[in-house]
């Protein structure tokens, strides 16, 4: 079947879908992308700040096609045979590139309102062969392993995966890939096959290097310049790298630099009662130390649990990594594309007046 958009139980050609009258903002975003595609207009996306201050970035249709083709080749997707599920917002590059891959493949795509509860809308015998999700989709009560496993190839991006999520995904029989990429690189430039890989492998012909500041630099076949990111990484082997955090989120406490994401993983490893989705590490200003480590949880933390963490970290000789304060929040700030908004979390921390204090 040639390119077809399925929307609210109706099927449309590309021109027909562009002409659909709607007040739905997420549908208008898809129509805007499709209109630019048909008329060879520039595509503009707002970056999330992976390479610095968020900004508007413009791409040509030829660049969109080249990026889409790289992923298509890496996943070995079949022209006119695939059926894409789209539940990410087209205002963001991750959602728009789902559309672009379907257009390049000349195949079917079903579009749904962006939602963390997408699995509630899918039938047990759904036809989708390719889909893109964010890690938050796995944390909902509406998540269905049976429906998920019917999707042959899945891309997961936008944020890191917890060890619990990785183990869950490994139990499925379909092919799931964790993606590395950003707005500046037009979505993914490296993939991690979760069933087999310990890190990300660059998608041909993209090239990845790690600079002297331990940050990732990306060169692609559709961008004229190398992209320098704030993502910290280390090589697992000569063609496989692991992302370990962001340089701009590093906590400098008394001259010691703490990576919040590595610290989160260490806390989970020290005690299995700490669940990755229930807490994040942030930072606050400290007149003596410069910055201090703050643990923010969306569940009530008993003092006994905090005390056990303190003892565990002292026994591991990791006292300097202990959170200075523990705060409770009703809900974590999440960006529109499903990431934890760490900058907003740090701003929230600075505005708090009440906290539990632990000894350093």
Image (cartoon, grey):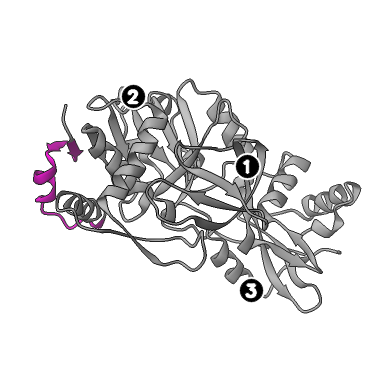
Numbered disc in front, either 1 or 2? 1
Q: Can you tell which quarter of the image residue 42 is in?
A: bottom left
Q: In 3D space, how far apart are the residues under numbered discs 1 and 2 (Cα atoms)?
A: 35 Å
Write the residue at 77% across / 79% down: 287
Label 3 element class: helix
Q: Which range is magenta?
A: 4-25
Was residue 111 drawn as part of the magenta stretch in this picture? no
Q: Can you tell which quarter of the image residue 251 is in?
A: bottom right
Q: Residue furthest front?
A: 224
Write the residue at 89% across / 50% down: 317
Was residue 24 drawn as part of the magenta stretch in this picture? yes
x and y percent of residue 281 in the render?
67, 57
Mark 1 lies on residue: 242
**Relative depth, front residue between 266 and 38:** 38
Mark 2 lies on residue: 124
| Residue 10 visible at all | yes
**Relative depth, front residue between 184 and 313:** 184
Image quadrant containing the N terminus: top left
Left or right, 68 with respect to 355, comes to left
Q: Residues within 10 Å of mark 3 (few under 14, many from 20)?
A: few
Mark 3 lies on residue: 350
x and y percent of residue 319 in the render?
86, 56
From this view, report whether residue 10 is shown above or below residue 335.
above
């Amino acid at each position: 079947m040639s390119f077809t958009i399925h929307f609210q139980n109706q099927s449309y050609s590309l021109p027909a879908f562009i002409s659909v009258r709607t007040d739905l903002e997420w549908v208008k975003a898809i129509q805007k992308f499709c209109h630019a595609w048909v008329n060879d207009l520039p595509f503009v996306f707002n970056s999330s700040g992976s390479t610095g201050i968020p900004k508007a970035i413009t791409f040509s249709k030829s660049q969109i096609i080249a990026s889409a083709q790289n992923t298509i080749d890496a996943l070995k997707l079949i022209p006119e045979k695939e059926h894409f599920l789209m539940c990410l917002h087209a205002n963001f590059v991750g959602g728009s590139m789902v559309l672009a891959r379907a257009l390049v493949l000349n195949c079917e795509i079903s579009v749904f309102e962006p939602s963390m509860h997408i699995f509630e809308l899918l039938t047990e015998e759904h036809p989708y062969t390719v889909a893109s999700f964010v890690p938050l989709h796995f944390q909902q009560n509406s998540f269905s392993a049976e429906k998920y496993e019917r999707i042959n190839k899945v891309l997961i991006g936008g944020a890191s995966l917890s060890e619990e999520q990785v183990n869950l995904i490994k139990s499925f029989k379909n092919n799931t890939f964790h993606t590395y990429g950003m707005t500046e690189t037009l979505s993914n430039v490296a993939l991690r096959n979760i069933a087999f890989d310990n890190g990300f492998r660059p998608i041909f012909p993209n090239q990845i290097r790690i600079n002297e500041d331990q940050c990732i630099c990306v060169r692609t076949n559709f961008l004229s310049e190398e992209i320098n990111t704030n993502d910290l990484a280390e090589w697992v082997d000569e063609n496989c790298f692991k992302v370990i955090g962001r340089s701009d989120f590093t906590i400098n406490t008394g001259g010691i630099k703490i990576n919040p994401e590595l610290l989160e993983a260490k806390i989970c490893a020290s005690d299995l009662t700490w669940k990755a989705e229930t807490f994040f590490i942030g930072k606050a200003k400290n007149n003596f130390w410069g910055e201090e480590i703050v643990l923010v949880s969306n569940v009530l933390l008993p003092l006994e649990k905090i005390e056990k963490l303190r003892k565990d970290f002292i026994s591991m000789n990791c006292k300097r990594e202990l959170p200075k304060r523990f705060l409770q929040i009703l809900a974590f700030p999440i960006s529109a594309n499903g990431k934890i908004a760490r900058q907003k979390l740090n701003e929230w921390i600075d505005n708090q007046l009440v906290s539990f204090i632990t000894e350093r």
